[in-house]
Image: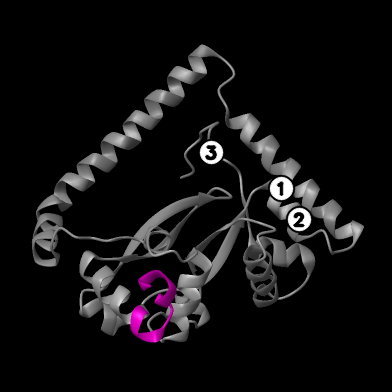
């Protein structure tokens, strides 16, 4: 169920953009990465599960500004369709925002009930989660962007280097995720989360680097010359 919040920014997925543009999702993904690399647009890359083959594939989510920049090279007709779609999404959101104090109270009550149900489900899972934490250790890791900043590399650069060194995968269904061997060594973990888009809950996967992994990767990057300037 989609959580209603006036503070949540609406986004459009690269898959939906591909439908409006009339091209393949792979083609849109390529354009997204090129524009992000150039610093023209900013978007969030996540993973979605294909409904038929159950495999995981990458997709991007963009706000209105970045969506319009992304499709600026297409025809006026296509841009008009995109704008119409955004207006539909905005109207749907406006209908869901409470219009009176009574509606706000009812919405708060509904959300409180949902939260209580989720907490009850989590309470059942706590023993299993605590056991898993004890086995895995307390260090769950930090995002690669934080590590990249600490060693003087940009997020785009660190992911590119990790793919070149065959530490991270480059295939579409596991893009920018570590190979299992490096996870088993304790260098990386993969955090699973959820996000809401177009009234649907989707699953995302984020690569994290552990404390052990930071020490190992710093040494690795020095050996390959990627951190030579920093070391000097």
Measured as percent of width and height from the top left, residue 83 is found at 79, 48
The residue at 53%/38% (across/down) is: 8
Q: Pick whichever, 87 or 217, lies toward us.
A: 217
In the displayed structure, 102 sits above or below 202; it is above
> What residue is pinned by disc 2?
69
What is the image's colouring?
Answer: one colour
State the residue lying farthest toward the top: 101
Residue 53 visible, this orientation: no
Task: Check if residue 71 falls in the magenta segment.
Answer: no
Q: Which image quarter: residue 74?
A: bottom right
The residue at 48%/19% (across/down) is: 104
> What residue is pinned by disc 1?
65
> What residue is pinned by disc 3?
8
Helix or strand or loop: what does disc 3 sit on? loop
The residue at 66%/74% (across/down) is: 30
Q: Which image quarter: residue 76?
A: bottom right
The residue at 45%/77% (across/down) is: 174
**What residue range appears in magenta?**
222-232
Helix or strand or loop: what does disc 1 sit on? helix
Helix or strand or loop: what does disc 2 sit on? helix
């Amino acid at each position: 169920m989609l959580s209603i919040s006036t503070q949540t920014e609406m986004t459009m997925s690269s898959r939906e953009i591909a439908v409006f543009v009339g091209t393949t999702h792979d083609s849109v993904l390529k354009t997204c990465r090129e524009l992000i690399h150039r610093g023209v647009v900013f978007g969030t890359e996540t993973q979605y599960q294909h409904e038929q083959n159950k495999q995981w594939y990458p997709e991007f989510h963009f706000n209105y500004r970045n969506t319009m920049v992304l499709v600026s090279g297409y025809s006026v007709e296509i841009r008009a369709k995109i704008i119409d779609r955004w207006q539909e999404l905005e109207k749907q959101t406006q209908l869901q925002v409470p219009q009176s104090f009574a509606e706000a109270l009812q919405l708060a009550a509904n959300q409180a009930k949902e939260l209580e149900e989720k907490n009850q489900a989590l309470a059942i899972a706590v023993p299993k989660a605590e056991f898993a934490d004890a086995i895995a250790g307390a260090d769950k890791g930090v995002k690669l962007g934080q590590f990249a900043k600490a060693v003087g590399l940009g997020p785009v650069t660190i992911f590119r280097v990790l793919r070149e060194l065959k530490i991270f995968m480059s295939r579409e269904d596991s893009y920018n995720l570590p190979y299992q061997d490096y996870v088993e060594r304790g260098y990386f973990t993969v955090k699973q989360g959820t996000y809401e888009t177009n009234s649907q809950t989707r699953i995302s996967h984020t690569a994290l680097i552990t404390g052990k992994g930071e020490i190992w990767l710093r040494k690795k990057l020095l050996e390959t010359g990627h951190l030579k300037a920093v070391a000097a």
